[in-house]
Amino acid sequence: MDCVLRELALQIRLEQSGDIEAIMRLNQLAFERLDEAMLIAHLREHAQPFVSLVAEDDDGQIVGHILFTPATIHNPTGDVEGMGLAPMAVHPDHQLQGIGKQLIKAGINRMADMQIPYVIVLGHVDYYPRFGFVPASLRNIRCQWTGIPDEAFMILVLDPIAMQNVSGTAYYHPVFEEVM
Ligand SMILES: CC(C)(COP(=O)(O)OP(=O)(O)OC[C@H]1O[C@@H](n2cnc3c(N)ncnc32)[C@H](O)[C@@H]1OP(=O)(O)O)[C@@H](O)C(=O)NCCC(=O)NCCS
């Protein structure tokens, strides 16, 4: 069997209205439940900015999706706005082919273009550090949710000057609390 992994030819682009059903199905398949699909639907309605990128293969199929929505760090000297990465999903038939990597890289580039100072993520500790995420606890930044492994809550700092001395509790968009 040919086990060589290759990067697929993909187009990474912003979601369009015609993609919404495919995004719902993809998230349901990848997470094997409806929760993330429902979360995305609510965030689409309430979160601004809502940066939703899809990976489209040569056949026009949506094989990956990543979402960024507003996050806030309650810093002692004032709130600092950034973005939260969640959720992200790659179609089970297409995982381990570098699609997630391409989505994250495209998303980070977009966040930098938008001059977003940081991105938080709660996720796989072996995966996100390769894109520059570090445990948020290193900066004394904590997750709004308790009981999660310390190293699973991570931050990518895009504007080190704006993030100098920023610490406190980080919050995803309120819709996360309502839906998840
Ligand atoms: C996590 C996910 C988005 C990764 O997408 P992908 O396209 O398969 O990932 P890539 O091909 O870019 O990267 C593959 C690498 O990620 C690692 N990886 C994939 N899933 C992982 C997991 N659950 N935990 C830790 N590492 C994981 C692989 O081991 C592989 O590592 P390697 O390069 O050292 O071999 C995808 O597996 C997925 O949709 N999973 C189900 C939904 C999910 O868990 N979403 C993330 C929520 S935080």
Image (tube, helix red, strand yellow):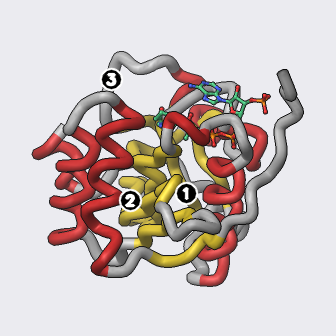
Dot 2, how many residues are within 10 Å of its Cα: few (below 14), some (14-19), or many (20+)? many
At label 2, the amino acid type is Ala
Question: Horizontal placement of 29 versus 47: left or right?
Answer: right
Q: Quadrant of ligand 1?
A: top right
At label 1, the amino acid type is Val
Calculate the distance from the C-alpha at mark 2 to the C-alpha at mark 1.
8 Å
Label 1, secondary structure: give it: strand
Label 2, secondary structure: give it: strand
Q: Earlier in the sequence, mark 3 or mark 1?
A: 1
Q: Mark 3 = which residue?
A: 146
Residue located at (73% from left, 46% from top): 98
Label 3, secondary structure: give it: loop
The answer to whether residue 180 shows anywhere in this view is yes
At label 3, the amino acid type is Thr
Q: Earlier in the sequence, mark 3 or mark 2?
A: 2
Q: Mark 1 = which residue?
A: 119
Whole-percent x, y for residue 43 in the image: 23, 62
Do callouts 2 and 1 mark residues in contact (Cβ within 8 Å)?
yes
Do callouts 3 and 1 mark residues in contact (Cβ within 8 Å)?
no
Q: Mark 2 = which residue?
A: 71
Whole-percent x, y for residue 14 in the image: 48, 77
Query: Where 140 sits versus 12, above or below?
Result: above
The answer to whether residue 162 shows anywhere in this view is no
Calculate the distance from the C-alpha at mark 3 to the C-alpha at mark 2.
17 Å
Residue located at (19% from left, 54% from top): 174
Q: Front-most of 69 and 166?
A: 69
Query: Where 23 sits versus 144, above or below?
Result: below
Whole-percent x, y for residue 103 in the image: 62, 59
